[in-house]
Amino acid sequence: MKKYFLIIMATFHSAFYPQQINEFKFLRYNDIISIDSTNQNLYYKAKQVRISKNPQAFLFFGAENRTQYQYFENENWDENLKDNNGFILNRALLYSDLKIGKSFRVFSQLQSSVTISRIDPNPIEENPLDLHQLFIDVNLKRLSFRIGRQELYYGSQRLISVREGPNSRQAFDAVKITFKRNNFSADAFYSYYVKNRFGNFNDKIDENTTLFGGYAVLKEIKFLNNLEIYVLNIQKDKSTFNTFSGAENRNTAGFRVFGNQSNWFYDIEGAYQFGRFERKNIKAWTFSVNNYFSCNINKSIQKIGLKAEYISGDRIETDRSLETFNPLFPRGAYFGLASLIGPSNLIDIHPFLECQLTRKLFFNVDYDVFWRASSSDAIYQPNVSVLFDSSGSNSKKIGNQLGASFNYEFNKHLIFTIEGTWFQSGNFIKDVSNGKDILFTAATLTLIL
């Protein structure tokens, strides 16, 4: 108990005496924690335990807690779904990382996701305690092997993500091989999706869903800057698209080019899907562009940009082709924390502005305009389940969404965010539901240790 008391006390000490040689990463197994204790404060000394001197073996600890208040008005576009007080989501993550030299490690992470006052929570919101990650790494020169339960994260997270937005992050039971040489790296992996379930220590693989493939990255190349190429396969015993259900065997081949030319930053991605869905041939595709210009004003960074994407939908229900794009395992908060719709059968135009108001305060505002790519197909949730099928409307306009947020970084341990979303219903939403406009607000406090 004394050790953990020292960690808590030293966290506040480090807010005033920060250590630059240590860094927290979005994927916590990539945290950088110096084993040189010469310039370490009490907090970092408490985070690590030396196991032996020869070979160098350390046990590292880390944690984070995210407390989030959310409020919906007209959730699911329905004024009858009333929750006048809102609700609280809390996610806690605790990890231990045993490293023996540079060749071997065992990483484990517990996750606790709970709700307070949430009406009818789902297993992603309410999953009190479970093993989120437990894997072994073995490194052999340019090759590394990772086996066990792990987060998978690739590219811009349009297809494979950790699902940071929702209350529970996403994991896979997987075997992954990584090759690295100079500016080139490539992964090959085979995985089962881990499905969240209500209760404690009962999250299990979904044996009906497998994902495997390869993902290659080439950095600092001429003209393109950075290039990613990938080939993925997903197999599911049962999928549903619009009004049809059946077995799915889908391949995805795609690319991503990203980088910058002076103050212009670009991110361009395209993917084509093929395979079988029951008796139908899959022929789906997507293309997206994310551009922004950056400038310094009074030593603060300001960005103005435009995103646009086309995500195919099924054009003729009764033919032998399925043209609905499957985004596999995308970011849960794909179009903002409210997570109202997902990236299938969609056309999206998305201007945005990001402002650094002070050294610690940031302001973001964006505006989305959504249409169905095909009036013969449904709109979908971020997890690719059908939100509203196509039977009730011929209209393509889904709606407009305005979002804004303030983000204040007290220090690298403590971050506070307040945000809001207003969704103006289009004709399609009005035809297939009660069609009320949605107002969503949230406040988030994140503690990183």
Image (tube, helix red, strand yellow):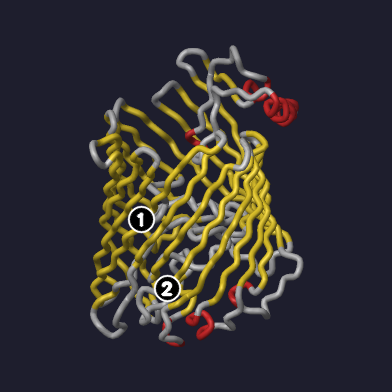
Q: Is residue 154 above or below residue 352?
A: above
- Measured as percent of width and height from the top left, residue 14 is found at 68, 26
Residue sitting farthest toward the front: 298
The residue at which mark 2 appears reads as 371
What kind of element bears circle 1? strand
- Measured as percent of width and height from the top left, residue 441 is found at 66, 61
Q: Is residue 99 above or below residue 110?
A: above
Compare residues 172 and 217 and report the one nearer the observer: 217
Is 26 on the left or on the right of 405, as rendered? left
Q: Using the image, tell me which numbered label, if any, was put on residue 228.
A: none
Name the image quarter holding the N terminus.
top right
Q: Amino acid at mark 1?
A: Val
Q: Is residue 56 above or below residue 290?
A: above
How many marks can you see? 2
Q: Is residue 179 visible?
A: no
Is 283 on the left or on the right of 122, as rendered? left
Q: Using the image, tell me which numbered label, if any, was put on residue 289.
A: 1
Q: Amino acid at mark 2?
A: Trp
Disc 1 versus disc 2: distance between alpha carbons?
Answer: 17 Å
Residue at the (40%, 81%) spot, across then down: 243
